[in-house]
Image (tube, rainbow, N blue to C red):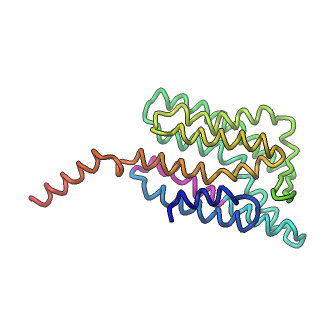
Amino acid sequence: MSIKFFTVLIYLIMCFSANASFGAGIVLSVIGVASIRKVDKPAHLLFAAIPLIFAIQQVSEGFLWLTIPYQGNLLTQKIMTYGFLFFAQFFWPLWLPIAVIYLEKEENRRKIQYLWLGAGIIVSLYALNGLVNHTVKASIIGYHITYEMDYFNSFRKYSGLFYVAATVAPSFCSHIKRMWIFGTTIIISYIITVLFYDNYVVSVWCFFSSIISMSIYIIIVHNSGISNPEYKVRMERGATIKAML
């Protein structure tokens, strides 16, 4: 079965149970490994590793599904809650623009990318302060996990703008082929989540991580020298010359 099949499958069931979250972690790991194996330049590794990091985030929420109903697992629940929010609020606004910066070759575009990284630093530091100095709580409501984070109330409007700037804008300011696919999937997933799952944005947004990861695989494949016809011709010529010698 293809990666695309598993992506669609997880898209349908993700984030609604422990099994779904753990299953998503497995599928995202497969996509991540496939993406990394297509990398032919070290600078592409940060971007290609995104699905694997998504997998870790999904597994942490899987453990939350298992531990929230039982008061005896408070320590594990707390660790997984903060672990999930670490990725969701602190990690991604930093990692995504940095990953795109490493891909960027054009100096002028790279300078623009640093602006989005600046936005990411601001919102990530704010989130880190909240995670360190305030109490957060995860609870199951219906078929979703909701995260109570009071520290975001006063800065929510602005933090959302900074978050979007850091995670979406870099994709549309890059020269990398098909990078717009990555940005578009993030925008679509965010809009749908806000419209239909406003009370569960942090958790339900991961519902779309498999689709986002699939776009990463596509981008890596189309920008890999291994998939470039000219690259293949050069390799064949090199092999021919070596054989003649």
Q: Is residue 177 left or right of residue 66?
A: left
- Report which quarter residue 243 is drawn in: bottom left
Please provide percent x and percent y for residue 101.
51, 38
Please provide percent x and percent y for residue 124.
71, 42
Give above or below for 110 relative to 96. above
The quarter of the picture where the C terminus appears is: bottom left
Give above or below for 114 relative to 77. above
Please provide percent x and percent y for residue 53.
61, 56
- Report which quarter residue 93 is drawn in: top right
Q: Is residue 10 left or right of residue 74?
A: left
Type of secondary structure dominating the magenta stretch: helix
In the displayed orientation, state which residue is furthest to the left: 245
In the displayed orientation, state which residue is furthest to the right: 71
Highlighted magenta segment, given as a residue range: 41-56
Please provide percent x and percent y for residue 125.
73, 41
Q: Is residue 179 left or right of residue 142?
A: left
- Report which quarter residue 68 is drawn in: bottom right
Seen from the viewer's position, the closer of residues 6 and 66 is 6
Give above or below for 24 relative to 72. above
Q: How many marks?
A: 0
Residue found at x 48% / y 55%:
35
Residue found at x 79% / y 65%:
65
Residue found at x 72% / y 32%:
161
Residue found at x 69% / y 52%:
206
In the displayed orientation, state which residue is furthest to the bottom: 72
As for residue 53 lying within the magenta part, the answer is yes
As for residue 187 lying within the magenta part, the answer is no
